[in-house]
Image (cartoon, rainbow, N blue to C red):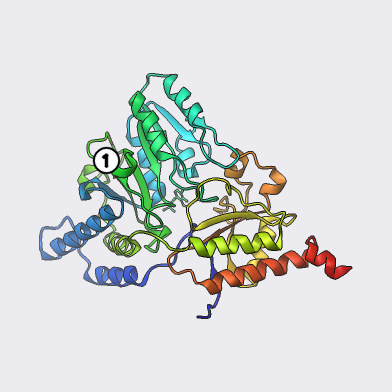
Amino acid sequence: MSVAFAYLDHNATSPLRPVAFDAMAEALKAGGNPSSVHRSGRAARSRVDAARRQVAALVGAMPSEVVFTSGGTEANNAAITGTGCQRVLVSAVEHDSVSKVAPDAEVIPVDGEGVIDLAVLERMLAASKAPTLVSVMFANNETGVLQPIADVVRLARATGALVHCDAVQGAGKTLVGLHDLGVDYLSISAHKFGGPTGIGALVVRGNAPFVTDRRGGGQEFNRRAGTENVAGIVGFGAAARAAGDGLDVEALLNSAETALLAIAPEARVFGGGAKRIGNTTCISMPGVRAETQVMALDLAGVCVSAGAACSSGKVARSPVLTAMGIDPVVADTALRISCGWNTQPEEIERLIAAWQDLYIRVGNSDIARAKAA
Ligand code: PLP
């Protein structure tokens, strides 16, 4: 199969799955407010209920534990502000939608591979008896590095702390279970695995404390006021159902990593020594700034991104790589490649060819030096 261009930026957003599109089109056509008691309202309610069951099944939760939100950002914001805990501990590599909501949070450091320091967390937990929330992500959006959530839960339970896990880059890509992980709060987002943008969920375990600062109607079991985004919810449910047990792209991405390292043996895979989710690689092209790589690869028909700190079209230095102690000059050459549900081998081939071409053109490779000699 030949592809028009290679889309390898699924951690930014993943293309909408056709099943999600179809389900949304039907829901949009049908309309209806799930709070209305007449037949149109009841039909909309039953669509939302069915989608709630599909999303709950994706994360091994009860439907009543799913609170639909406008996405991962709102889910993270709500988790950090909604537990009533005075004290918040966050890892040094959290997404802005966690770290910026808790500017006074105490920061759990990570090692050079981007994995949190459990011994430090244990000491931090023992240092205060105040009600505490620990927020540690499942998989990092830039490096794909997985955090030891089971250990975080074990340490937190020993001191009665609550645990939130931002699983936005895990759910729909690999198995992520609220109860299997043992966390109290889980954030997920539809558009990271083939659902629409603007819809996500905060999954709140059983009777874990949760208060909302939104005022309005009693939607979402009084946990999130506002008329539901029915089409978004339905698309989320359809994508969750299609995602099933997750992605099968690890071998493809491993082959890309091997090929890129063969082209540039001095390149570095960030978090390469840690357990990582199988869809993400963060790799340096020695001596070439990430912005240059992104633009050159785009011209060659390959969509990837520079680290993650690219929210308003500007590329800033990656706080994740900084927290990992990576030399700033090296961090500035980091490229993020992320695969998803529809990634084809041809896309990986195109990436490898374009990356090699750029590396030779900039002239700092052995191949380029050999050609010039
Ligand atoms: N958390 C992580 C780890 C993310 O990567 C993102 C998006 O990139 C978010 C939260 C925010 O999710 P959303 O785009 O649905 O608001």
Q: Is residue 245 visible?
A: yes
Q: Is residue 104 visible?
A: no
Q: Where is residue 111 drawn, in percent x and y? A: 57, 37
In the image, 167: left or right of 365? Answer: left
Q: Where, quadrant-wise, is the C terminus in this rendering?
A: bottom right
Q: 37 and 306: which one is in front?
A: 306
**Pointer 1: what residue?**
205
Secondary structure category for the residue under label 1: loop
Q: Where's residue 240, x and y in %?
A: 32, 60
On the rendered structure, is 141 left or right of 334? left
Residue positioned 47% across, 23% down in the render:
123
As drawn, which residue projects farthest toward the left? Answer: 38
Residue name at image x 69 percent, y 44 percent = 328
Q: Nearer the viewer, residue 239 or 349?
A: 349
Image location of residue 82, percent across then percent down: 33, 36
User: Residue lying farthest right?
Assistant: 373
Instruction: Name the residue rendered at 56%, 52% in the picture.
Output: 308
Image point (57%, 47%), residue name = 271
Query: Dot 1: few (<14), some (14–19), or many (≥20) neighbours within 10 Å?
Result: many
**Is 331 situated above or below 341?**
above
Front position in the image: 104 or 188:
188
- Image coordinates of residue 61 in percent, x first then y, are 26, 48
Residue type at mark 1?
Arg
Q: Is the residue indicated by label 1 positioned so its CB lies within 8 Å of ligand 1?
A: no
In the picture shown, does residue 87 fall above or below 166? above
Report how many numbered discs are placed on residues in the image.
1
- The quadrant in which residue 288 appears is bottom right
| Position of 209 relative to 94 (above/below) | above
Q: Is residue 29 left or right of residue 366?
A: left
